[in-house]
Image: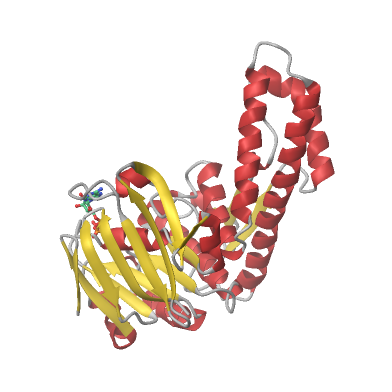
């Protein structure tokens, strides 16, 4: 079960776009700036979270529209309707509807598991740990919808602790106790889910050949215990130091996903651009394999095919076909997709107008 219909209204440069007849491979072809990534972004909003560009809802409303946007989709097999929208009166409030009933965004995760790779993620290994945590959290979330709740509760408590520690007056220790209890509970659950996913991904990756996608080895790097009581003790012991620093120096908000290229035992940040890309693809494919058979999965791969040589491209398509996911890809020309043309739905995108080919 995956998307069988997608509609966009006033979404970035798409005034009114409707896509039907999806297949396993769905390819959007068009010139630079035509609106291909915008379609992938719209699909990414059908998962909990901020979407593929992490944009504010108001940024996504079409400049020529009425100040709001709507993205809606139908899932086959029962005709489930899911959608998300904003309106001009509250352009940054994104409402979510499932079969007509408004509900929390986290519920979207019960229907679909969506992951993506975009060119912006090519720098993920060179950037700060925050980018890798976000990437990892996205993968965890696609497997466990409750992850978003733990992450939000942890961040809310962390902000409150930082605020208290930064105040001139000595914070009330009982108040801090309560906040740290909340951080420890949600933080330990969040970190344990990340660590479990990394371990599972590692097991899948071990079974995959070194080529053509450079095999990464993954470690969930954490300096704090992943268990509630122990994490709570670490937070309590760190109060004085954190008060001096003006922020919380320990906790899963500092964790990292450490990635090395297995064959060379080299940190990912030191690898070539191509190797880094290949490792990202390997991780996403391992994730697809790991979550096979669970909720319907969508993979959004922005500008991937054109950047791979023919051997890697063929291997990618082969693995994607076996993954059981509905795959969405973009490109400026059809040539890189020639070998999957027969099993693809193809759309031409031009100035925010989409036509089936
Ligand atoms: N809020 C908005 N309202 C109207 N148009 C917008 C809005 N936000 C972005 N755009 C337009 O969307 C277009 C970019 O679309 P998109 O990123 O989907 O292009 P693309 O087809 O993926 O291009 P490329 O091949 O260069 O990656 C730009 O023309 C941009 O001006």
- Front one among 10 and 263: 10
Hey, which quadrant is residue 178 in on the image? top right
Count of numbered tags: 0
Q: Is residue 171 left or right of residue 313?
A: right
At horizontal 38% and vertical 66% (from top left) the residue drawn is: 301
Question: 203 above or below 48?
Answer: below
Is residue 344 depicted above or below 100 in this figure? below
Q: Is residue 281 visible?
A: yes
Residue at 25%, 53% in the rendered image: 12
- Asked if residue 247 can be seen in this view, the reply is no
> In the picture shown, does residue 102 fall above or below 285?
above
List x then y, in percent, for residue 306. 29, 68
Residue visible at 20% across and 56% down? 33
Measured as percent of width and height from the top left, residue 94 is found at 41, 50
Q: Position of residue 171 (x, y in %)?
A: 73, 18
With 184 as the anchor, is 325 left or right in this view?
left
Q: Is residue 214 left or right of residue 355?
A: right
Task: Tell me where residue 312 sits by quadrant.
Answer: bottom left
Q: Nearer the viewer, residue 288 or 326?
A: 326
* Colouring style: secondary structure
115 or 341, nearer to the observer: 115
Give the farthest residue toward the front.
Answer: 101
For the C terminus, which image quadrant?
bottom left
Quick one: which residue is furthest to the left in this view?
A: 351
Q: Position of residue 23 (x, y in %)?
A: 36, 82
């Amino acid at each position: 079960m995956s998307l069988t219909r997608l509609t966009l209204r006033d979404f970035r440069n798409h005034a009114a776009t409707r896509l039907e007849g999806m297949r396993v491979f769905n390819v959007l072809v068009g010139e630079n700036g035509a609106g291909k990534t915008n379609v992938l972004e719209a699909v990414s909003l059908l998962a909990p979270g901020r979407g593929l560009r992490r944009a504010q809802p108001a940024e996504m409303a079409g400049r020529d529209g009425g100040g709001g946007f709507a993205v809606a989709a139908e899932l086959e097999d029962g005709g489930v309707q899911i959608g998300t929208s904003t309106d001009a009166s509250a352009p940054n409030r994104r409402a979510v509807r499932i079969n007509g009933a408004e509900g929390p965004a986290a519920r979207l995760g019960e229907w679909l598991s969506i992951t993506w790779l975009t060119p912006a993620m090519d720098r993920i290994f060179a950037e700060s740990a925050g980018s890798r945590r976000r990437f990892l959290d996205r993968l965890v979330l696609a497997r466990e919808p409750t992850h978003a709740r733990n992450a939000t509760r942890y961040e809310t408590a962390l902000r409150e602790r930082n605020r208290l520690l930064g105040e001139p007056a000595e914070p009330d220790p009982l108040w801090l106790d309560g906040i740290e209890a909340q951080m420890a509970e949600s933080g330990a659950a969040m970190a344990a889910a990340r660590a479990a996913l990394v371990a599972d991904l590692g097991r899948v990756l071990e079974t995959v050949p070194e080529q053509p996608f450079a095999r990464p080895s993954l470690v969930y790097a954490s300096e704090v215990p992943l268990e509630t009581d122990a994490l709570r003790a670490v937070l309590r012991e760190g109060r004085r130091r954190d008060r001096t620093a003006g922020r919380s120096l320990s906790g899963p908000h500092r964790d990292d996903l450490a990635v090395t290229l297995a064959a060379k035992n080299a940190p990912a940040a030191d690898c070539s651009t191509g190797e880094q890309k290949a490792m990202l693809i390997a991780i996403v494919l391992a994730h697809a394999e790991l979550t096979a058979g669970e909720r319907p999965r969508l993979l959004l791969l922005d500008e991937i095919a054109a950047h791979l040589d023919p051997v890697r491209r063929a291997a990618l398509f082969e693995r994607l076909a076996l993954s059981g996911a509905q795959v969405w890809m973009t490109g400026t020309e059809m040539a890189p997709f020639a070998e999957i043309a027969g099993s693809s739905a193809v759309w031409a995108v031009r100035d925010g107008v989409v036509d089936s080919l």
